[in-house]
Image (cartoon, rainbow, N blue to C red):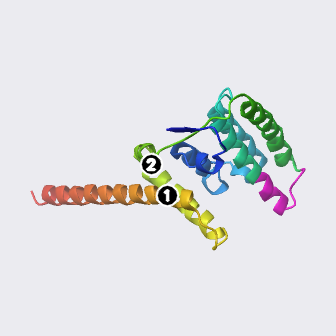
Amino acid sequence: MKKYAEDVSKEVVYSVPWQALRVQLLARNSPKGGFDTLEGVRDNIQKLKNYVGNMSDINKVYRSLNLLNAARMGYASKDEIGTPKDKALVKFRDDLDKKYEELKEKDKTFTVDTPEQISKDLKKVPIDLLIEVERDLKARKRESDPDEDHPILDSFLNLVEEEVARAEKKSSSILSELRHLISSLESR
């Protein structure tokens, strides 16, 4: 990990454990509806509270705050500001925002994972979740301004794609070996 005193918030969100958690909180991956239902919001807030712990890690607080701000922008686009799910989200978002401001005043140090750390962390993520991270990041990139460069996202996404390809190749090889083994057992 590299430490930075300046604002590197764009890099901070490209942490493998964070991206794996983030995609699990989305409505399509959450049995309780993600940020689309009050029950989903409450469930997501609990998961984020577990993630940030005592709120001493500026990276985790920033990532969580960033996600909640994005959820609120989604609410605004659907005229859902002030709804029960929004009110539930806002309370925790405001707590995070206050803590983030305190952390910035006290210690402005962010840490960013190196490509080596990212590659190591990717190997720990189940393939189905890794595929979901890849799918979501590709969709986010398509939805952005086509004239805008995304070097940080591109670098992270390349590492994710490489790991998905490696894991799929390994799975295919194992499946082939199993078929061969079954075939040889059946011929006995």
Q: Nearer the viewer, residue 76 or 175?
A: 76
At which x and y percent is residue 11?
Answer: 59, 49
At which x and y percent is residue 133?
Answer: 53, 55
Tell whether label 1 touches label 2 (CB within 8 Å): yes
User: Which circle marks residue 23 in the picture?
Assistant: none
Q: Residue furthest left?
A: 188
- Is 75 a magenta residue? yes
Look at label 2 and name its amino acid: Pro
Pointer 1 residue:
155
Segment colored magenta: 71-82
Q: Classify residue 140 by image quadrant.
A: bottom right
At which x and y percent is residue 45?
Answer: 72, 39
Q: Nearer the viewer, residue 98 or 110?
A: 110
153 in relation to 30, above or below: below
Q: Secondary structure at mark 1?
A: helix
Look at label 1 and name its amino acid: Ser
Q: Residue furthest top?
A: 54
